[in-house]
Image (cartoon, grey):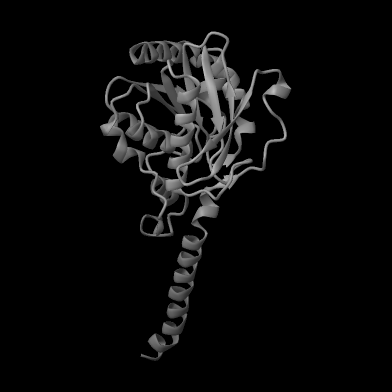
Amino acid sequence: MDGVRRVWPWLAFLILLYLVICALAWSLEKKLVYFPGPAPSTTPRELGFEQQDVRVKTVDGLQLSAWYLPARAPHFAVLVCHGNAGSIQDRIPKAEALLTYGASVLLFDYRGYGASEGDPDEPGTYRDAEAAYDALSALVPTLPIVVYGESLGGAVAVELARRRGVAALLLDSTFTSLPDVGARAYPWLPVRWLASLRYDSLAKLPALECPILIAHSRDDELVPYAQAEALYAAARFPKVFVETHGDHNAGGLLLDPAHEDVLADFLTSATRAGR
């Protein structure tokens, strides 16, 4: 009995400490998910690309920063939903790659990223993508629009496809849901109970009817390859799976020449059907 009395205060302390850690993790959730970069210091124009600055206005009144890079003879357009870190400046190489496929490209920053106003949250990133899509539609009213999403941007792209008539989806290094990623990163925390940010692409994909290409690397240290396989299994046909290489930030789908043929075939087929 005396032993129990001596152990109990320590046990109570550990339980309290664990609850404090859980509360701290919950309060810091957005800081653990969103890593916005500063306003860009380099533009596509400075690197020799034709560029149009676009001010995108969201339904809740925020101004987002965006760059439109027109192709010389565009066959379609691509809206790029970038990942959870950095800004559109970091996605210039991906825009350059997309231009080679005959695509005009719109890069935009979510609220709180780069030179965009506001602070990021899940509903806000969805509204941002809608506003960017509508701005691109106004710029290219006769062209089909493909949406490319990397990592977190893949989840944003999936939700956008539920709200707008996209010609196709390119999902690069994206996850099934944010709690799935968090539970793997923090197995000692009740992430699925604590998480308010869901980004649940796995639940949404079965309802989408557009062509979908899913790309993922077995070397991805942040999002397991199995999550991409689960996304692919949940998606409807027509769908394509591409195994890329490198870590989570390697950008394999667009920046590795090994995937040019399959990506070109997919884009040609999807955008031809979308006309």
Seen in the picture, residue 242 relative to 55 is either above or below; the reply is above
Q: Nearer the viewer, residue 31 or 271?
A: 271
Q: Position of residue 128 (x, y in %)?
A: 48, 39
Q: Where is residue 234 in the image (x, y as percent from the top left)?
A: 28, 32
Please indicate, yes or no, whether residue 78 appears anywhere in the rendered image: yes
Seen in the picture, residue 263 relative to 230 is either above or below; the reply is above
Where residue 4 sits, quadrant-wise, is: bottom left
Name the residue located 37 percent from the left edge and 39 percent from the top edge: 176
Name the residue located 35 percent from the left edge and 16 percent from the top edge: 274
Q: Position of residue 225 (x, y in %)?
A: 42, 34
Q: Position of residue 77 (x, y in %)?
A: 48, 19
Q: Is residue 72 left or right of residue 272?
A: right
The residue sitting at the top extreme is: 73
Q: Nearer the viewer, residue 191 or 221?
A: 191
Q: Is residue 138 left or right of residue 99?
A: left
Seen in the picture, residue 159 relative to 148 is either above or below; the reply is below
Seen in the picture, residue 124 relative to 257 is either above or below; the reply is below
Name the residue located 39 percent from the left edge and 34 percent from the top edge: 160
